[in-house]
Image (cartoon, grey):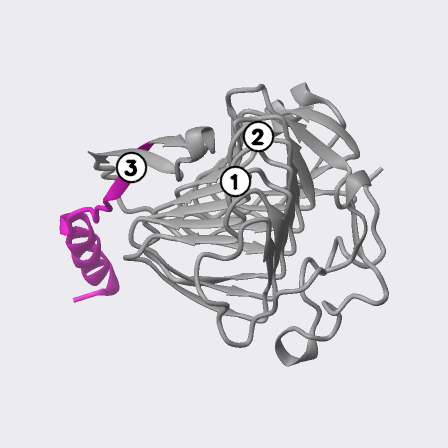
Amino acid sequence: MNHRFFIGILITLLLAVPALYAEETEYVINYRDTIANGNDTTFAISVTERRIVPPLRVEQVRFNTIAVPASSRQLENALVRSQRGDTLVLENGRYRGGFRVPAGVTIRAKEKGKAHIVGRGRNKVVSLSNGNMIHGLRITGGTIGVYSEGIDNSILACIISDNRQTGILAVAHFVRIEDNLIFRNSGSGIQFWDIETTGEILNNTIVYNDNHGFSLGGTSRVGLTNNIIAFNGRFAVKINPVSEIFQEFNVFLSYIQVNMTLPENNFSFDPEFVSPERNDFRLKETSKCFNNGRNGTNIGSRVYTALWRME
């Protein structure tokens, strides 16, 4: 037998192998996050199953960086053209929100806090799918600032404020949330619902939201470390009894105190912002948030507390 015979047999076997399939669950959520009549946050959840059955294929993942001028149309075009592995770098300026980020795509501000994504009132400003990262964006003016129900998503060093309900809403899967400034949303700062995967929310400043600072609903299990959660309208942290939360080295201060005994290795003191009435959330030099976090690190956003001021 020659080598051509063996190659023919190999090809026949490969063609005979059935395609591999994957399943995906789509969660349809009707959310409401208000403080009307003093009621707690309520959710109406309905779940539908959508089975996606793609054939097995091998993709070559690209890693392209796409510069996006300060134009909503340019951003829309870039989102349409982008593929898994691409990074969109946004110039300083305003962009129209209400879009969904394609799977595997990163959106990054050229300068942190200077690429402003503005919602359309009743829409989610930015919706994440799977494998997304947003970094350094300012997100305002929607019903929900950032919505995530996919896997492997990250929200890093963003400013999320002035949304009609929640700043960040995550359903089903943990989303990495680090170094964000989340303030003055009309609902809660962050809400999680039925989070299947476990993770840790690190070094965020979550302040002056009208409802809770952080709300954990459904059956979820997450950690909170090195966060400032202060001056929110209701609870600093609101937890569903069937959920689990692990907390350490956070500063909890609220008009209504945290809805539990202050956990060990956490603090309750004024973080001492420079000028919160002017949205200047840098820490004064006398703040106890310096060097009191895990392993002697700072508490709160490491991006928006030291040398940064909103213009």
Horizontally, residue 290 falls left or right of residue 6, namely right
Tell which circle, 1 or 2, labels the residue nearer the N-terminal end.
Answer: 2
Element at label 1: loop
Q: Which residue is mark 2?
A: 79
Please state which of residues 175 and 294 is positioned toward the viewer in this rendering.
294
Element at label 2: helix
Of badges 2 and 3, nearer the viewer stands: 3
**In the picture shown, does residue 1 fall above or below 305?**
below
Give the magenta part as a residue range. Answer: 1-29
**In the picture shown, does residue 275 fall above or below 100?**
below
Of badges 3 and 1, nearer the viewer stands: 1
Please state which of residues 128 and 306 is positioned toward the viewer in this rendering.
306
State the separation of the CA atoms marked 3 and 1: 28 Å
State the separation of the CA atoms marked 2 and 3: 22 Å
Q: Amino acid at mark 1?
A: Asn
Which residue: 47% across, 48% down? Answer: 131
Q: Which residue is mark 3?
A: 26
Q: Position of residue 161 (x, y in %)?
A: 64, 37
**In the picture shown, does residue 130 fall above or below 32?**
below
Q: Which mark is residue 158?
A: none
Q: Which residue is mark 1?
A: 211
Which residue: 20% across, 62% down? Answer: 6
State which quarter of the image contains the N terminus.
Answer: bottom left
Could you classify mark 1 by the number of other residues whose Cα lies within 10 Å: few (under 14), some (14-19), or many (20 or more)?
Answer: many
Q: Amino acid at mark 2?
A: Leu
Q: Looking at the image, can residue 279 be seen?
A: no
Could you classify mark 2 by the number of other residues whose Cα lies within 10 Å: few (under 14), some (14-19), or many (20 or more)?
Answer: many
Q: Amino acid at mark 3?
A: Glu
